[in-house]
Image (tube, grey):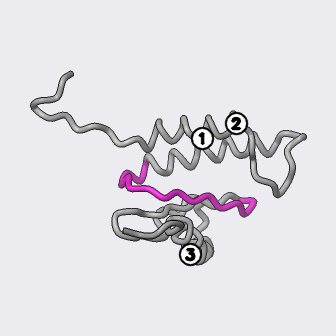
Amino acid sequence: TDGPGFDQALMFGSLDMVAEKAWATNSMYLKVVETHRQCDVSAFRTAGGCTMLLLHKVKEDDKIRLFFSEVHELLIKALSNPFAEKDRPIAHPSFEARVQHISKKYLRAKKKKTPYSES
């Protein structure tokens, strides 16, 4: 298994690939920029240069794109708040709760039904 902090190192290391892909496309959704074992790192870069990364096992590109799009809308709303501190993390419980809700909406693994599953 990978040691503690490996996920963060993988995400940080993927930033080079984000910069490379961002120059090659006009799209904000950069798709998968890094892969390690069964995990992928997907990226979304806003017009303002904010980079969002997602470490995931979900292989459904449309759902990941929709996740990023909704989080981007939420980010715009949060940054449009006149009391928001620029260049600071968004540390608001409702922002985190909404991101978690969007995550569950698009990224939660569906349970496969088996002949023995209860309906």
Q: Secondary structure at mark 3?
A: helix
Task: Assign a secondary structure to mark 1.
Answer: helix
Residue with the mark numbered 1: 99
Q: CA distance from mark 3 to mark 2?
A: 28 Å
Image-quadrant location for residue 112: top left
Residue 21 seen anywhere in this rendered image of the structure: no
Q: CA distance from mark 1 to mark 3?
A: 23 Å
Residue at mark 2: 93
Which mark sits nearer the N-terminus, 1 or 2?
2
> In the image, is residue 28 part of the stretch drawn in magenta?
no
Report the side of 88 relative to 119 (left or right).
right
Q: Report crowding for label 3: few under 14, some 14 to 19, many 20 or more residues within 10 A (C-alpha).
A: few
Residue 112 visible: yes
Callout 2 crowding tier (Cα within 10 Å): few <14, some 14–19, many ≥20: few
Q: Residue at x 54, y 67 (%)?
A: 5
Determine contact: label 1, label 3, CB under 8 Å: no
Q: Is residue 110 left or right of residue 34?
A: left
Residue at left 65%, top 61%?
Answer: 51
Residue drawn 38% across the image and 52% down it: 58
The mark lying in front, picked from 3 and 2, is 2
CA gap between label 1 and label 2 equals 10 Å
Amino acid type assigned to the residue bearing label 3 in the image? Gly
The local secondary structure at tag 2 comes to helix
Q: Position of residue 18 (x, y in %)?
A: 58, 71
The residue positioned farthest toward the top in the image shown: 119
x, y percentage for residue 49? 72, 63
In the image, which residues are magenta? 47-62
37, 31: nearer the viewer: 37
